[in-house]
Image: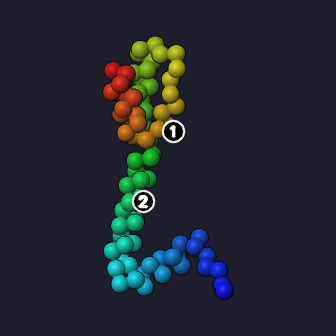
Amino acid sequence: MKQKNFHDPLGLLKKLLDHPHGLELANVVYQLHKDLQTDTQSNSQLVAIALNQAKTQGLNYIPYFKQMTNDEIRMWITQNS
């Protein structure tokens, strides 16, 4: 039995498009991926606000905001304001 390579994005896309609702499914997956990428990339403006707030309060421990999602940074700002 031939093993399928599921790490081939084009092969997966071709297989998905063979499905009757493949185009719709591909669009949903793309949108979810795009939304996830947007949320996980730290907003530099939020990072700057959080850093400024931490320095103003004279905190000894300042989190590494660039590894946080936008929602996590917003939550930190709200909790520390």
In the depicted view, which residue is nearer to us: 6 or 63? 6
Tell me the kind of residue under disc 2: His
Q: Residue sitting at 52 percent across and 31 percent down?
A: 64
Counting residues from the start of the chain, the first of labels 2 and 1 encountered is 2
In the depicted view, which residue is nearer to us: 15 or 41? 15
Q: Residue sitting at 40 percent across and 34 percent down?
A: 73
Direction from residue 23 to residue 65 in the image, left or right: right
Q: Distance from label 2 to label 1 (Cα)?
A: 18 Å
Crowd tier of the residue under label 1, counting other residues whose Cα lies within 10 Å: few below 14, some 14–19, many 20 or above: few
- Quadrant, the N terminus: bottom right
Direction from residue 3 to residue 11 in the image, left or right: left
For mark 2, what is the residue? Answer: 33
Direction from residue 69 to residue 3 in the image, left or right: right
Q: Residue sitting at 40 percent across and 66 percent down?
A: 29
Measured as percent of width and height from the top left, residue 49 is found at 38, 28
Crowd tier of the residue under label 2, counting other residues whose Cα lies within 10 Å: few below 14, some 14–19, many 20 or above: few
Q: Residue furthest top?
A: 58
Residue 28 lies in what quarter of the image? bottom left
Residue 20 lies in what quarter of the image? bottom left
Which label was assigned to residue 67?
Answer: 1
Tell me the kind of residue under disc 1: Gln
Residue 6 lies in what quarter of the image? bottom right
Q: Residue furthest front?
A: 1
Determine the secondary structure under disc 1: helix
Q: Residue sitting at 33 percent across and 21 percent down?
A: 81
In the depicted view, which residue is nearer to us: 21 or 31? 21
